[in-house]
Image (tube, grey):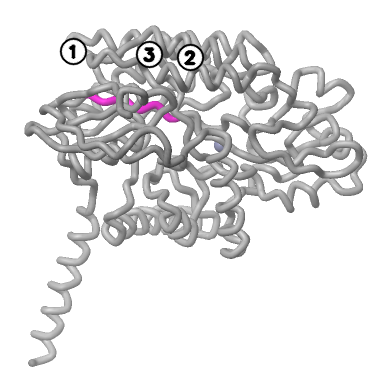
Amino acid sequence: MPPVRRLAWVLVALLVGAAALLSAGPSSLVDWRAMRAIAIESDDWGLCGFVPSVTAWEGLRHEDLSPGRFPAVYWNSTLEDSAAVASLAAVLQSHRGRDGLPAVLQPNYIVSSQAYEDGVWRRHDLPDLPRAYARPGMWRAVGDAARAGVWHPEFHGAWHYDPRLQRQAIADAPQLVAAAARGIMLFPGSEAARELGPWRSTPQLAAELDTALAVFGRAFGRAPGSIIAPDYTWDGRVEALWQSRELAVIQAKREQRHPDYPSGLAGRVLKVLERQWARAAHPRRTYLERNCRLEPVQSPDPREVVAACVRDTERAWRRGEPAIVESHRVNFAHADRSFEEAGRDGLAGYLAGATTLPSGPPVFLVDAEVAALAGRGTSLRAGPGAWVARNGTHARRVAWLPPAEDGVGRMATLLLLDSGCARRLDVHDAR
Ligand SMILES: [Zn+2]
């Protein structure tokens, strides 16, 4: 072949490849315009930070901790307690979708913490909590909310920060040791000390993931169905590890941070290429993009945040996407109770707005349902006390309810689901 012609063929191949790469995106068996789905993702639950209470700051200065870029409202962000969980659950329960099922929150959990207690670092795995973060009755409130179908725990990570960097950072600095002894989680440079940073070895991350998933399973009685990396920082190794552990529904791919990419335009282009490559090369992974932001306590105008979130919800539907709402724990658990109230009011306002739109009410889904409906047309949401089976297609479909994991009670069951149906299955009925 003459060199010019060969070059032309190479160019054509490159163009076709680039077009395939850039157009790679999610395909779905479900019409999300008609489905009008809302999934709510909330990070940082279970995180024993950033302070146990406002009194922990007495005699200490924020400046001594110099964590890096840190939004003001987070200085008094704290671990949720029973009242915070129960009041939030009540808000969720009072708003229902068109299928009669209530709004459901996906609290993304950090499952372990290291606490500086009696002069040594001690590890605590959920449901165990450090002494400074005692929360009587909290797990009962979580269990009640889960049984009511409004609380669907998902996975955020093991520690949130690289635990070794946290231990190293406070060594020999009396102010920092004092802060750690009081349960303050911040330390110099903590903002950049991300749990899944590129400096951490793959075997170490694999072992940490296995332990964290075992902790999650013991705490919540099932494996997680979706994941969000701490501080949006992860890489291809980490995604491969997640997938090898059946964690293939990945939240907020568009927010992904790559600390080792160059800054500026080159970094942004690399990021887009990486994302498109991941979509094209890993069809078994589901990437869910957060397309609605509900962070009222971080704004001087919470009402506008709520109104914008309702508008973005409708826009997502019009684009043919489920509305994926981001709302961090800091809106609902805070050492200053007035923030909790503002956050709950914001959520209540959003749910009231989104369930009374003139175009009709929505349905509330969890990430795993979004992924299953897109891929298979049907979904099963596992929960304590009840399962929810759905068929999002226009045809009658069969779904498979697996046997109880403990091997006693419920047998494997085939379900016939009518088009567009949502069925709540009491676990006892399914036996
Ligand atoms: Zn987080």
Distance from Cα at disc 2 to Cα at disc 3: 15 Å
If you read the primary sequence from the N terminus, does the residue marked by circle 2 or circle 3 appear first?
2
Residue 157 versus residue 137: which sits nearer the camera? 137
39 magenta-colored: yes
Instruction: Bin the neighbour count of mark 1 within 10 Å (Cα to Cα): few under 14, some 14-19, many 20 and up.
Output: few
Element at badge 2? Answer: helix
What secondary structure predominates along the stretch shown in magenta?
strand
Distance from Cα at disc 1 to Cα at disc 2: 24 Å
For the C terminus, give its image quadrant: top left
Residue at 47% over, 25% down: 327
**In the shown orientation, is residue 412 left or right of residue 105?**
left
Q: Where in the figure is residue 217, as x and y percent of width and height?
A: 53, 40
Residue at 54% over, 59% down: 260
Q: Which residue is mark 2?
A: 89
Q: Which residues are magenta?
A: 36-41
What's the mark number on residue 360?
1
